Every structure is written in structure tokens, then in C-alpha cells.
Amino acid sequence: MAVTVQQIADAAGVSRGTVDRALNNRGRVNPEVAEKIRRMAADLGYVKKPRKNHEKRKTCRIGIVTQLAGASFMMEINRGIREAAQELADRGVEVVLKEGFSVDEKEQLDAIRELEESGIDGLAIMPVDCEGVREKMNELVDRAGIPVVTFNSDIVGTRRSCFVGMDNVKSGRTAAGLMKVLTGGRGKVLVITGYFMNHVSSSRVAGFVEEIKASCPEIEVVGVRSSFDDADEVEKIVLHTMETIPDLDGILLVSGGQTGIRKAFDALQLKKRPSVVIYDQTPKNERALQEDTVDFLIDQNGYVQGYRPPHILADLLIKETPPAQELFLTDIIIRTKYNL
């Protein structure tokens, strides 16, 4: 027997109307609730009935440019992009994804130009924080009339329509608060970032350092090291630091390569490890929490960051509905092994 909308509503604990809006992208539904409903529908085997007399035709084309495609946090962002693309196809919207694998100005500019030359009506981008990308984004808006939405990472000095993502400075301050609890507000802490050119990582580090100086003067930040989101490099950084500072009290890793921490701890055979705060809820990071390799994980709700920008652009292009606000900030979610 076919699964009904009412059965999904009962299982998800929401109204039938909310299920209909979530499954058909009609009206406003909290993105997290919509995600729960879509997962519930998939688990129950719900099959959406095809619309009658529906003629599929492309009414607009949205380009998406990402960076660090190989990073673990991109799994959830890409899942949001895929689901948005599937839904928008019913509205005649084509979504074209160009993945970047580094934080490189030329790589990103090439991707933007390829999309522009192929013909796009809107662009969603995780921008590299550099002058070339800034100028190109403004050129798209001013000269070509192509609206731009940034997500995950933002960039100042552009005429983008809005930003979807975490307040990374505030999340850095949150990490400082967690480290204060873990260390008792004193000791030596190492900060590991990914790429210094990555706006997300640099904002988290800035928020962390600012809050440590303001509220934890007895915590010494012994260094900010770049790992290029590479687990082997993270391992080397931790090993080298703890060889010179064996009484290290804490480690904050604001980017990828988290498995390197476990490798370093195993190699050092520590009786007592430093306190550790990392980012992004991925299967590997969940295991790190469960195995007590790390203490806290801060998640940025990557699914929403991938899912919402294509819909914002589609509404802007098709309905001529501008974004309701400039900043769509995702929650700063704190995970421990007890609330996964």
C-alpha cells in the first residue's frame, strides 16, 4: 500500500500541510524540519505522484561554486545542494555545480567564468577571500545582472544578495568558552587552522583568540598553525608541538584533518591527553567523540547551507522575490558523545 502524506505527518509529528509544503517546496518550512520530513518520507518509501500535464522546461539556470570539495564537512553541504537541485528541477530550474578542491583564486575564477560562459542566471558561491573573486562577483552583479548568494564563507566588499552560513566569529568565541570549561581557564592551547586564505577558518580563529584574551587571560595560545586540511599535517603539528610543549592543555582544530589528532595521540601514548575541540559532525568525527579522542564538536548545519541558496536564487529569479534578510545564520550546534 502506498505511503500517504498523513502517515508521514503522523510519523514526523507535524501537520499534513507542513509535510506537503516540505515535500513540494511550497511556502516556508524550517529547513531542519523539512529535512526531517524528507528523511522520514524516504525511510517510509514515499513516492511523490507526478504532476498532471507538467511540462518540464528550463526557466533558469543556477551555478554553484564550492571549495575544498574533498573535505569531510562538504558531505552535508553537497547533500543539501543535491536535494535542492532535485526539488528545483520540478520548477524548471537547472542547478550546475562546479567543485573546487582547494582555496585557490585562479581555480575559483576559472569555475565562475566557465559557468558564466555556459549561461547562468544566478550564482551561489563559497568565495575565496581575495580581490580577484571580489571583483568578479561585483562584475556579475553590475554588468551581467546575475544575482549572487554566498554560503558557508562570506566576503566583504561585494554586492551579493545575502549570505547563508554560520557566524564563524561567534562560533570561535563559543569554542573559547568550551576550552575555558575544559581547562579551568588556564594553561597552554594550540590552535590549528586549514588555509589562512579561508575566510571561515580565519574568522573562527579570530573569534577564539579575541574571547580567550577577553575572558581567559590565564590561557596562553602557544601558536596558530596551518594544516591545509590534511590529516597527516595535523598529526605532524600535534607531534611537534607536544615534543616541545609536553604539558599542552588544549587543542582547537577549526578545519579538516581531524583524524590526525588521534594518530598523534596514539603515537605519543599519552597517559592524559590535552582537551580537544573540533568542528563538523561527520561519521569520523562522531567516532572521535565516542572514543574520547575529542571532547566537543561544533557543527555548522552544512545541509542547510547547501540547500537554501539555490532556493533563494530560484525565488529571486522566477518570482522576483528578494531575500527576506541579508544574513541567514545557521545554528552553532555543540555536540558531545552524549547527544549525538
Image (spheres, rainbow, N blue to C red):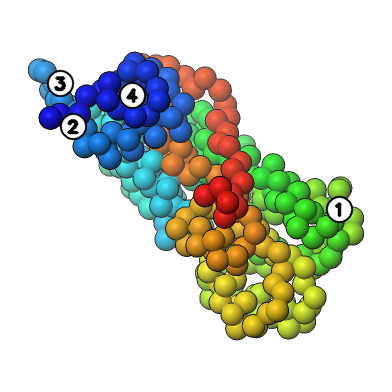
**Residue underneath mark 2:** 47
Query: Which residue is situated farthest in the right direction here?
Result: 218
Q: CA distance from mark 2 to mark 4?
A: 15 Å
Left/right placement of residue 189 relative to residue 26 reads: right
Q: Mark 4 or 1, which is nearer the eye?
A: 4
Q: Amino acid at mark 3?
A: Arg
Q: Give the side of residue 61 with respect to residue 309, left or right.
A: left
Looking at the image, is mark 1 or mark 2 earlier in the sequence? 2
Question: Is residue 54 positioned above or below 231 on the image?
Answer: above
State how far apart marks 3 and 2 are (Cα): 12 Å
- Which is more N-terminal, label 4 or label 2? 4
Residue hosting label 3: 51
Marks 4 and 1 in Cβ contact (< 8 Å): no
72 over 267 or under it: above or below: above
Q: Amino acid at mark 2?
A: Val
Q: Earlier in the sequence, mark 4 or mark 3?
A: 4
Task: Give how far apart the Cα atoms at labels 3 and 1 are.
Answer: 59 Å
| Mark carried by residue 216 | 1
- Residue under the image location 47 percent in, 19 percent down: 322
For residue 153, say whether it is visible: no
Disc 3 vs disc 1: Cβ atoms closer than 8 Å?
A: no
Badge 4 vs badge 3, beta-carbon distance below 8 Å: no
Q: Position of residue 285 (x, y in %)?
A: 52, 60
Q: Which residue is mark 4?
A: 9
Q: Residues within 10 Å of mark 2 (few under 14, many from 20)?
A: few
